[in-house]
Image (tube, rainbow, N blue to C red):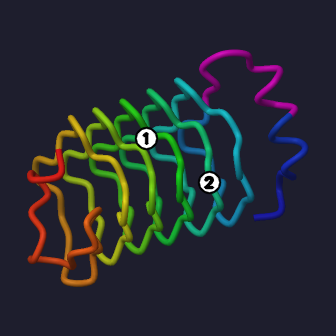
Amino acid sequence: MGEITRKDLILSLISAGTKPRLAGVDLSATNLHRLDFEGANMRGANFSASNLQEAILRSTNMTGANLQVTQLPFADLSSANLTVANATGANLQGARLTNANLTNVTINGANLKDANLQGANVTGLKFDNNTIWPDGKKGGDGNPGSYT
C-alpha cells in the first residue's frame, strides 16, 4: 500500500473520534492489528491481505468490503454489517460474529473455526468445499444456519 503508515492511521483515528469514516479507503496489506474501529463506516473499503487480528469492528458498516485473504482471527465483528462483502480465503478463526449481517457474503475457502455466529444473518451466504465451519466441518458438511 505505502500511502499511509500505521502511525498515520492511528493518529487519524484518534482525531476522528467516534465512528471514523473509512468508506472506500484502500487499506490492503496494512497492519491494523488490535485497532478499534467500532461504529466506523467502512463501506466498500479494501482490506485484502490486511492484518485485522483482534481488531474491534463492532457495529461497523462493511457493506461490500474486500476482505480477501484478510487475517481476522479473534476480531470482534459483533453487529457488523458485512452484506455482499468478499471474505474469500479470510481467516476468521475465533472471530466474534454475533448478530452480524452476513447476507450474500462470499466466504469461499474462509476459516471460521471456533467463530461465534450466534444470531448472525446468514441468508445467501456463499461458501465452497474449502470453507471451514466453527465446529471444524468443511464445505457442505456444515450448514450455516446451524451455527446461528
Q: Residue furthest top?
A: 17
- In the picture shown, does residue 146 fall above or below 61? below
- In the picture shown, does residue 146 fall above or below 140? above
Find residue 36 and report its image quarter: top right
Residue on which the image places disc 1: 62
User: x%, y% of residue 72?
Assistant: 53, 57
Label 1 or label 2, whichever comes before in sequence order: 2
CB atoms of marks 1 and 2 within 8 Å: no
The residue carrying pointer 1 sits among few (fewer than 14), some (14 to 19) or many (20 or more) residues within 10 Å by Cα, namely many
Q: Is residue 9 magenta?
A: no
Judging depth in this view, the residue of 86 and 58 nearest the camera is 58
Q: Amino acid at mark 1?
A: Met
- Please state if 8 lies on the left or on the right of 103 as rendered: right
Residue on which the image places disc 2: 52
Q: Amino acid at mark 2?
A: Leu
User: x%, y% of residue 76?
Assistant: 50, 40
Element class at badge 1: loop
Q: Is residue 14 magenta?
A: yes
Q: Residue furthest bottom?
A: 129
Name the residue: 45% across, 38% down. Answer: 43
Q: Which residues are magenta?
A: 11-21
User: x%, y% of residue 129?
Assistant: 19, 83
Q: Quadrant of the N terminus?
A: bottom right
